Image (cartoon, rainbow, N blue to C red):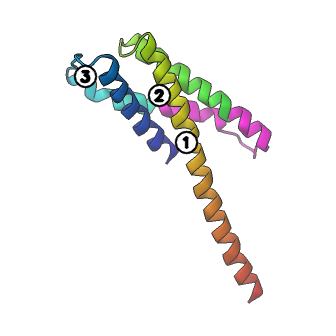
Amino acid sequence: MNFFIIVTCVTLVIGVLGLIYEPDRRFGYEAYFSPLIFGLIGVVPSFVTYSKREPTLRQMMIRKIFQLFVLEAMILSFGYGMDIMYGPMMFAVAGAVFAVFLLVHFFSYAIDYREATRLNAELKLFQER
């Protein structure tokens, strides 16, 4: 779910920033491939968090930070390489990707916390029976 939210928000941010920084720029049909490419770029850094055994909280935090840096580097290098973004727009996209990443993980944590609380309450009721 995080993948879809990140990719959607990053694509939206790039579109909005593109309208701000380059409102007269027009794309051809190849522009339809950019969400797919950004999707691929968005999924590659998730391999950083993969582990055969359960990582500690500290290890997972380090992996998430590394995942953010890899995501930023891949999106910005692709955008620059494809001449989609440059100069001040790159800083704006980097900031937006950072904000989206934090928001997605905050909401994901909140949803997981709510679900864990609900399951614990149900387990407590089950044990009392």
Q: Is residue 71 above or below residue 104?
A: above
The mark tally for this picture is 3
Q: Residue at x 55, y 19 (%)?
A: 73
Q: Nearer the viewer, mark 1 or mark 2?
A: 1
Q: Residue furthest front?
A: 20
Question: Disc 3 marks which amino acid?
Answer: Glu
Specify the label residue 103 is tagged with.
1
Judged left or right of residue 45, residue 12 is: left
Dominant secondary structure, magenta: helix
x, y percent for residue 11: 38, 32
Query: Which label is found at residue 7?
Result: none
Label located before the other in sequence (2 or 3): 3
Q: Which residue is mark 3?
A: 30
What type is the residue that disc 1 sits on?
Leu
Q: Residue at x 35, y 16 (%)?
A: 84
- Residue bearing the label numbered 2: 41
Residue 125 in percent (x, y) is at 71, 83
Q: Give the class, few, some or many, for how many residues have Cα within 10 Å of label 2's Cα (few <14, many ≥20).
A: some
Q: Which residues are magenta?
A: 41-63
- Few, some or many C-alpha atoms within 10 Å of disc 3 (few <14, some 14-19, many ≥20)? few
Identify which residue, 91 or 125, lies in the foreground: 91
Q: Secondary structure at mark 3?
A: helix
The quarter of the image holding the C terminus is bottom right
Report helix, strand or loop for mark 2: helix
Which of pointers 1 and 2 lies earlier in the amino acid sequence? 2
